[in-house]
């Protein structure tokens, strides 16, 4: 019995027969117990001719939200921060910052500062070693040149003695043994000279114009300088820097915490406010850059904001800003239209980032120009 009643009720609700429709017609009641949208009636996907006519004339009304020019930027931890946590936050909401300003410091800063100090100390050592090597190379070269001159004199004396010993041997004044001694002395002097000349070659400039030891010390210095630069860049892993000029809108973390994927804080250029409207795709052909726009919100009271259309998007998406009516269409296809607020309206709106507004775009009656594109 219950099953029969259930089936009958569901059938009468979703498959309204002639009798049910006659009852509603006779009693002037509407299905849905007085709700705005009748129950169990098919949703009309195609608007009526009257609705189409009203959509093709008059101003374009759209929902949207206020935002800084260029949108809101979520500032995350720097690349390579790892599992570092926040040590200090150096800004508050409302602060105006410039690109590159330090917004927060992580607890890994001390480690990177120690690495930088070590690298700078090594750089100072390498500079001293290079200076010392240059002095030593210069002194060694001068010493070898002096030794070469002495060896050349010794060889000349040995060769002269060898010639004299040979002459005296021919005269019978010297013995063969004394001649052999003279030969050995000359050979030794020649070997000493060759060794000194070979040693001098090591202290001569190479293809790069530097003496070998100086070239090695110079390369070590360059490596130390690179290490210092890397250590300085590593400091940025422990500092959160402002990506651009703007104001701090929200600080989403505190000291001791590790920021979530949503970022440490949010910022934007609130000095130049704009509105991002979601215009139904059927309305967009009537919108053009430069058209005046007025915006209202319950938060602003009777005051209106004004601006002009500055950009018309090209990507059709789903509506994200909806009215309070629960029966409102939340699956509409819209394009984003950006409105640049005038100076006075921008100053008024900077306190209301992401405030939902209702905008009216003043459309000229002659729309033959077709302002949908940009």
Image: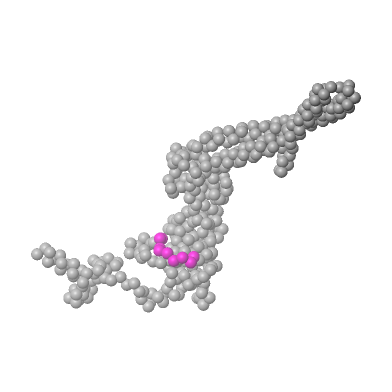
Q: Is residue 125 above or below residue 252?
A: above
Q: Where is residue 174, by image quadrant?
A: top right
Q: Identify whether 260 is placed above or below 45.
A: above
Residue 317 percent location from the top left of the image: 42, 64
Magenta span of residues: 313-321
Residue 150 in view of the camera: no
Magenta highlight: main SS: loop
Q: Position of residue 46 (x, y in %)?
A: 35, 74
- The residue lying at 20 percent from left, 69 percent from top is 13
User: Is residue 20 shown left or right of residue 61?
Assistant: left
Q: Residue at x 50, y 63 (%)?
A: 338
As rendered, which of 57 and 152 lies closer to the eye? 152
**Which x, y percent locates residue 199?**
73, 33
Which quadrant holds the N terminus? bottom left
Residue located 59% across and 35% down the image: 119
Q: Is residue 324 above or below residue 156?
A: below
Q: Nearer the viewer, residue 148 or 1?
A: 148
Q: Could you say which is closer to the camera, residue 59 or residue 122?
A: 122
Q: Is residue 204 magenta?
A: no
Whether residue 277 appears in this view of the structure is: yes
The residue sitting at 58% across, 33% down in the picture is: 118
- In the displayed structure, does residue 298 sit left or right of residue 226? left
Relative to 136, 64 lies left or right: left
């Amino acid at each position: 019995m219950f099953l029969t009643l259930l089936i009958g009720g569901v059938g009468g609700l979703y498959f309204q027969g002639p009798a049910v429709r006659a009852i509603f017609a006779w009693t002037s009641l509407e299905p849905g117990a007085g709700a705005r949208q009748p129950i169990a009636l098919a949703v009309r996907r195609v608007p009526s001719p009257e609705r189409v006519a009203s959509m093709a004339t008059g101003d374009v009304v759209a929902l949207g939200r206020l935002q800084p020019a260029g949108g809101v930027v979520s500032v995350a931890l720097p690349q390579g921060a790892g599992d570092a946590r926040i040590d200090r936050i150096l800004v508050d909401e409302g602060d105006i910052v410039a690109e590159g300003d330090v917004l927060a410091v992580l607890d890994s800063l001390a480690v990177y500062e120690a690495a930088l100090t070590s690298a700078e100390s090594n750089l100072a050592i390498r500079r001293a070693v290079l200076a010392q090597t240059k002095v030593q190379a210069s002194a060694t070269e001068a010493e070898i040149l002096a030794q070469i001159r002495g060896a050349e004199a010794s060889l000349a004396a040995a060769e002269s003695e060898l010639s004299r010993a040979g002459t005296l041997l021919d005269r019978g004044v010297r013995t063969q043994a004394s001649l052999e001694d003279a030969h050995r002395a000359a050979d030794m002097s020649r070997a000493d000279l060759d060794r000194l000349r070979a040693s001098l070659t090591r202290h001569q400039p190479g293809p790069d114009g530097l003496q070998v030891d100086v070239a090695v010390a110079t390369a070590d210095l360059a490596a130390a300088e690179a290490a210092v630069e890397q250590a300085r860049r590593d400091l940025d892993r422990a500092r959160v820097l402002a990506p651009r000029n703007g104001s701090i809108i929200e600080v989403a973390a505190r000291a001791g915490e590790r920021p979530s994927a949503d970022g440490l804080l949010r910022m934007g250029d609130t000095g130049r406010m704009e509105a991002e409207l979601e215009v139904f795709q059927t309305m967009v052909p009537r919108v053009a850059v430069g058209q005046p726009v007025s915006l209202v919100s319950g938060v602003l009271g009777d005051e209106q904001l004004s601006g002009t259309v500055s950009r018309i998007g090209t990507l059709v998406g789903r509506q994200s800003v909806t009215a309070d009516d629960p029966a409102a269409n939340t699956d509409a296809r819209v394009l984003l239209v950006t409105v640049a607020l005038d100076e006075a309206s921008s100053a008024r709106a900077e306190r209301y980032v992401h405030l939902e507004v209702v905008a009216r775009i003043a459309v000229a009656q002659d729309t033959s120009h077709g302002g949908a594109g940009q």
